[in-house]
Image (cartoon, grey):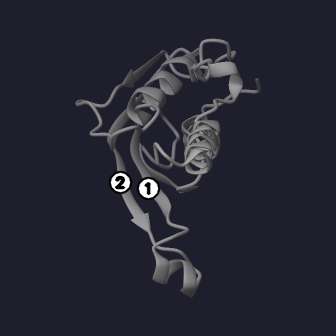
């Protein structure tokens, strides 16, 4: 290669082309943190409300952007507020997990060549809602499960990968929020109008 200037130019061009794939979007800034401190809590007609966080740290796959156990705990801590005179509502995060795998391409040629793989993250959460000391309620304990499958192409940048993970976690929290408010409103009959 020292004696052939053409090969040297090709090698430099390939190296520079490879560096172009490392360019960051989002101006190299980290993604925004997901918080719930800005939301106005729903009034719940009980004398007290307790949010019990996950008892242990979630075991996350390497490179996963955020701990869903911490996000769900923050959600429960900020989402509801006691505004009644009797009873206690307790939310307990029982289980949170993130499983990781790599799936082969759906296309035969890509699969044969080992191309077009995608990462698969499965985020699972289990929550228990307890109503203690309430009267005229159908149920005193309800368990909810939520999950979200997140698929990410092997060809995306790190920023795009983190963004897809955060979007998946956001959708998981939306699903959980809808289910929790439904239980508190329809089954426990404790949720007022926001």
- Can you give x and y, in whole percent of width and height, for residue 63 in the image? 39, 37
The number of discs equals: 2
Specify the label residue 122 is tagged with: 1
193 vs 16: above or below: above
Residue that badge 2 annotates: 99
Judge whether residue 82 can be spotted in this image: yes
- Can you give x and y, in whole percent of width and height, for residue 139 in the image? 46, 48
Badge 2 crowding class, 10 Å Cα cut-off, few under 14, some 14 to 19, many 20 or more, is few
103 vs 47: above or below: below
Q: Does residue 36 appear left or right of residue 141 in this picture?
A: right
Badge 1 crowding class, 10 Å Cα cut-off, few under 14, some 14 to 19, many 20 or more, is some
Q: Secondary structure at mark 2?
A: strand
Of callouts 1 and 2, the N-terminal one: 2
Residue lying at the far bottom of the rendered structure: 108
- Can you give x and y, in whole percent of width and height, for residue 28 in the image? 62, 20
When asked about the image quadrant of residue 36, the answer is top right
When asked about the image quadrant of residue 130, the answer is top left
Specify the label residue 156 is tagged with: none
Q: Secondary structure at mark 1?
A: strand
CA gap, disc 1 to disc 2? 5 Å
Q: Does residue 112 appear left or right of residue 156 in this picture?
A: left
Q: Are marks 1 and 2 in contact (CB under 8 Å)?
A: yes
At 69% from the left and 15% from the top, the residue drawn is 40
At 35% from the left and 54% from the top, the residue drawn is 99
């Amino acid at each position: 290669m020292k004696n052939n200037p053409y090969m040297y130019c090709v090698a430099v061009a390939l190296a520079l082309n490879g560096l172009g794939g490392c360019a960051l979007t989002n101006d190299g800034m980290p993604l925004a943190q997901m918080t719930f401190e800005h939301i106005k809590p729903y009034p719940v007609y009980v004398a007290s409300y307790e949010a019990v966080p996950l008892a242990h740290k979630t075991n996350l796959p390497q490179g996963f952007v955020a701990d869903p156990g911490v996000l769900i705990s923050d959600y429960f801590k900020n989402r509801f507020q006691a505004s009644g005179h009797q009873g206690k509502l307790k939310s307990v995060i029982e289980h949170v997990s993130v499983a990781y795998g790599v799936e082969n391409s759906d296309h035969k040629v890509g699969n044969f060549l080992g191309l077009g793989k995608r990462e698969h993250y499965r985020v699972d959460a289990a929550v228990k809602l307890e109503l203690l000391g309430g009267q005229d309620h159908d149920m005193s304990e309800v368990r909810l499960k939520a999950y979200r499958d997140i698929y990410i192409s092997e060809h995306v940048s790190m920023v795009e990968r983190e963004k897809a993970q955060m979007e998946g976690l956001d959708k998981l929290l939306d699903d959980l929020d809808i289910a929790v408010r439904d239980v508190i409103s329809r089954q426990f009959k404790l949720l007022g109008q926001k």
